[in-house]
Amino acid sequence: MSLDTTDFDRKVLIAPSILSADFAELGAECRAVEAEGADWVHVDVMDGHFVPNLTFGAPVAKCIRPHIRTVMDVHLMIAPVDPLLEDFAKAGADYITAHVEAGPHIDRTLQAIRALGCKAGVALNPGTPAETIEYVLDRIDLILVMSVNPGFGGQSFIPAVVPKIEILRRMIGDRPIHIQVDGGVTPETAPLVTAAGANCLVAGSAVFKGGSVADPSAYGRNIRAIREAAEAARVRA
Ligand code: DX5
Ligand code: ZN
């Protein structure tokens, strides 16, 4: 794995969300999706406060880290976020993404993530405008565009976020920043987001459906279907 921006490109990356995995088998699930073609593993952390659901914290992230050989992509749906950043860095996160809505000091949060040696991501809820991050672009490595309201897997994609992806893609210009989309990504919706300029697709239910650690071949079929649909519509610029 390389986090060096000198080899940055905009190829399509598929990041399965382990929110849809069997939580009793998290390590094996991470190994299975990677063996079946995942580029990154997306780890959803929810606090029952910023979002109306609870998942797990840094101790669990630390336990699954040895089972991830690619990139551990941690999406923090928690507020306040700053007090827990160090725990997730120590747990081995490669990317740490915080929500712009989770506190008043996103610039400080992003600086703290990089100071901990991680790549910094910023997430935008569906109702949050692109302009909220216009002045922190030089502090970020990833923009996560939520295409559902965060909290649960298996929700329907919100098409109103597509024009926001286009705005963000223009806004970042040549900066080495991934545009990630999270929520309701399927082979049907993937082309909409890559045509708009996204390159990193998070998918939970659409990856894990029909498979298991005992029989993970469906994961591979699902990942390939999303990737092929995404690449066919991808913006080359
Ligand atoms: C939602 C999470 C997503 C979610 C995606 O709050 O951030 O990562 O698990 O799940 P699907 O792909 O099922 O919409
Ligand atoms: Zn997520």
Image (cartoon, rainbow, N blue to C red):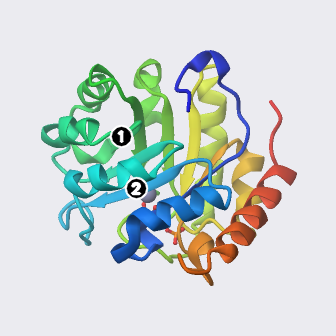
Residue at image coords 48%, 60%? 30
Question: Which mark sits nearer the N-terminus, 2 or 1?
Answer: 2
In which quadrant is the N terminus drawn?
top right
Q: What residue occupies the far right of the structure in this picture?
A: 232
Name the spot of residue 191 as percent of width and height, x first. Answer: 77, 58
Looking at the image, do the residues carrying marks 2 and 1 touch, with CB atoms under 8 Å apart?
yes
Q: Locate residue 81 relative to residue 172 in the image: left or right.
A: left
Relative to 85, does residue 220 appear above or below in the rendering? Answer: below
Q: Is residue 167 visible?
A: yes
Q: CA distance from mark 2 to mark 1?
A: 9 Å
Q: What residue occupies the far bottom of the structure in this picture?
A: 210
Residue under circle 2?
Answer: 43
Q: SS for tag 1? A: loop
Q: SS for tag 2? A: strand
Q: Locate residue 88 relative to residue 80 in the image: left or right.
A: right
Residue under circle 1?
Answer: 93
